[in-house]
Amino acid sequence: MAKLLMKGNEAIAEAAIRAGCRCFFGYPITPQNQIPEYMSKRMPQVGGTFLQAESEVSAINMVYGASGAGARVMTSSSGPGVSLKQEGISYLAGAQLPCVIVNIMRGGPGLGSIQPSQGDYYQATRGGGHGDYRLPVLAPSSVGEAVELTRKAFDLADKYRTPVIVLGDGMIGQMMEPVELPDDGESAREPESKPWAARGWDGSSPRAIINSLYIDPSVLEQHNLALQRKFAEIEKAETSFASERVEDADLVIAAYGTMARIARSAIRMARAEGLKVGMIRPVTLWPFPSEPFAQAARTAKAFLTVEMSAGQMVDDVRLAVAGRKPVHFYGRTGGMVPTVRDVLSRIKEAV
Amino acid sequence: MAVVFEKSRSLTDEILTYCPGCTHGIIHRLVAEAIDDLGAQSSTIGVAPVGCAVFAYNFFAVDMMQAAHGRAPAVATGIKRALPDRIVFTYQGDGDLASIGMAEIMHAAARGEKITTIFVNNAIYGMTGGQMAPTTLVGQVTTTSPYGRKEELCGKPIRMSEIIAQMDGTAYAARVSVHDPRHVMEAKKAIRRAFEAQRGGEGFAMVEVLSTCPTNWGMTPIEALKWVATDMIPYYPLGVYKDSSKGAA
């Protein structure tokens, strides 16, 4: 497989197409515009559908329709646009419709900025819309990993009949890196059959009804219990993380996405100075990899969470560490990106 | 013995959840007959709105999706783009289509989306208990216009058929009523034509059906039918506002 130099956003779009995505509905917003632009060029070449919707609200509801009709479908956006999609995401979760939603995060709140951020962690990992639901959230820390995780997102979506979020920060979306794309032969597999999809009723099986309304409270509770069982299954089977030099570490850093790469450089410098520092990098933000943090709490003296936010993932780290060791936090907001030197000095304060 | 009357195949045996005297039932029947006439039951996917017709997925014997409030045209667009050879329709009320879903309906029409929209206009929010709708008449009393709709506060009611007919992507737009048998027969023709326009790939098609809400209007069913004729039709003139097969363009 030849390596290609690709921008993160374009690599995500191509990975989606190679994962069998044939419907894309989106709306322009920086810093993810290369995804819809790329899709508008590629979809007609592969016999797929690209449609620029009149709004984020419409885009996510087009996703609902296409997914309900059995298509592999994706949309992408950034913070403010993802906020607009939340109603539709809740309906997708309630109706158990598979789809992939890419959020290339920018600074917030409000219109915020167009610079990279990780401020949408809460929104992504807590469901984001109304009602009791969670969505798998995959957080790539390189363009190559973005390709892998986009593919995985479609598989998880179909396997569990759930929307899946690919959560990248603006740097992942905008930077160029060499990537290996799975060739078409490998990935042109048909999505598994979807007997639940609404594609026209021939009378041989029950009618397909795509719906999230259960007016009888006892029935809605049963529906919620079934959803919770599904979420528990996802937590058990799909949690993913990478740990680096944690075994002998006095200080364990928690970081994801671009922030993990900056932390890695800081750890290298700290190690060169004799400081025992390691890192746990969550790849799935939900389900959150609590177990490796709980384990590390037995040997490490402290934790340091670094984020491009005012401190969001640090809550999950604290839940996992459960008060056994101190959990420090360092973050920048508004599109400001912590430097390696910043992180190194925080490491020195924390050990 | 010859069978002279049958239930439409595209309706289920479920008991309708509409109030006595409401004309949703007639409109459901006309939609089902149109689907039957086209032989499209097995290739049709319907989209239910939020509003009184939220349970439409229980009543139409076709594959159905339930959409968020106002978003039915976007959901229908997603279905139609994924499955272009299917017949896709939305069934929406006035709050759903002309208020919260105004962007979705306008852009579906602008794109010439090959779907059929049945727009049930009863000048009030029924499901939520009789609040003012974008189509509530000036002076009409509702639970959120207790002194009557005031033009200076809320403007005048929106005439959707006239607006939709202005869009280049619209193949067919008509306003009909079901307050008496003659008008029911005309409504039937219009609804059938709106499905034919979709099957012929002509563009977006919408039929606005003036409907009753005796419960929230505070009228008997008979008074409500009369009110459609005396109060609604003068403001909402019936007729075909656009028909691409008539070569007007």
Image (cartoon, coloured by chain):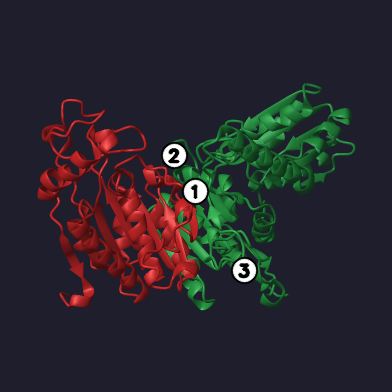
Residue displayed at 51% across by 78% down? A45
> Mark 2 is on which residue type?
Gly
Q: Secondary structure at mark 3?
A: loop
> Mark 3 is on which residue type?
Gly
Q: Position of residue A346 (x, y in %)?
A: 70, 31
The reply, left or right, for residue A225 in relation to residue B151 is: right
Circle number at residue B2: none
The reply, left or right, for residue A144 in relation to residue A7 is: right
- Could you tell me which quadrant the N terminus of chain B lies in? bottom left
Q: Secondary structure at mark 1?
A: loop
For chain A, give the colour.
green
Q: Which residue is mark 3?
A: A20
Classed neighbour count for the residue bearing mark 1: other residues with Cα under 10 Å, few (<14), some (14–19), many (≥20): many
Task: Tell me which numbered mark, 3 or 1, is placed earlier along the sequence.
Answer: 3
- Do we see residue A351 in this rendering? no
Circle number at residue A112: 2
Query: What subunit carries mark 3?
Result: A
Q: Which residue is mark 1?
A: A78
Residue displayed at 51% across by 37% down? A215
Classed neighbour count for the residue bearing mark 3: other residues with Cα under 10 Å, few (<14), some (14–19), many (≥20): many
Give the red chain's letter.
B
Classed neighbour count for the residue bearing mark 2: other residues with Cα under 10 Å, few (<14), some (14–19), many (≥20): few
- Do we see residue A329 in this rendering? yes
Whether labels 2 and 3 belong to a single chain: the reply is yes
Using the image as rendered, state which of residue A319 and residue A188 is in the foreground: A188
